[in-house]
Amino acid sequence: MTTPGYSREFIEEREAEEAERRRQLEEQQRENARIRERYLKGLDDERAAKRAEHDAEIEASLAADKARAMRSWLAANPGRTEADFERLAWPHLKANLLEERQRQVFEATKAAMRASGKYSF
């Protein structure tokens, strides 16, 4: 069945061209998806690296407190090892130390804002 005014060859040509355009579009979409995945993986890798760097900075800043807490904990818990401290006590102590530092920073910021006279709390 042909459309009036168009030959069968013309219609088949147009259908073949349309099929080729769809194939090219699908290929381009697949390529775009591959590029997007590589880009997102790069972002994830970058975030992970920044997070690891940040965690290392935190650990370094807490090193003195950690050493002091470990000595105290080991003295209070004879028969326990440094690995026990790392596994059992340090996660909780670290969270407490970080919370305390965050509170100190908040209070210092609040005091500085109050001292500026522009803010009231």
Image: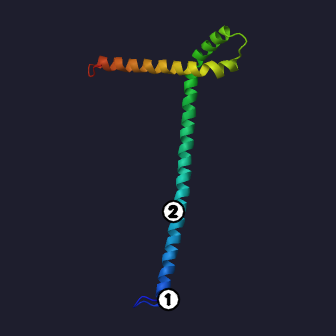
In the rendering, at what x and y percent does residue 56 appear? 58, 28
Quadrant into which the C terminus falls:
top left
The quadrant in which residue 59 appears is top right
Q: Which mark is residue 29?
A: 2
Q: How many marks?
A: 2
Q: Which mark is residue 95?
A: none
Vertical placement of residue 70 versus 23, above or below: above
**Residue sticking out furthest to the top:** 75
Residue lying at 52% horizontally and 18% vertically, measured from the top left: 97
Residue in the foreground of this view, choosing between 28 and 89: 89
Check residue 9 in the rendering and tell me which mark sits there, or answer none.
1
Amino acid beneath label 1: Glu
Q: Is residue 88 above or below residue 31?
A: above
Q: How is the image coloured?
A: rainbow
Image position of 114 with respect to 4: above or below: above
Classify mark 1: residues with Cα within 10 Å, few (<14), some (14-19) or many (20+).
Answer: few
Disc 1/disc 2 C-alpha distance (Å): 30 Å
Mark 2: give few (<14), some (14-19) or many (20+) Cα within 10 Å.
few
Given residues 108 and 25, the one toward you in this image is 25
- Give the quarter of the image for residue 51: top right
Secondary element type, mark 2: helix
Q: Residue drawn 48% across and 89% down?
A: 8
User: Does 44 sit left or right of 71 as displayed?
Assistant: left
Left or right: 70 as drawn, with respect to 3: right
Q: Residue at x 48, y 20 (%)?
A: 99
Per the image, label 1 sits on a secondary structure element best described as: helix
Q: Amino acid at mark 2?
A: Gln
Task: Give 46 or 102, whichever is nearer the viewer.
Answer: 102
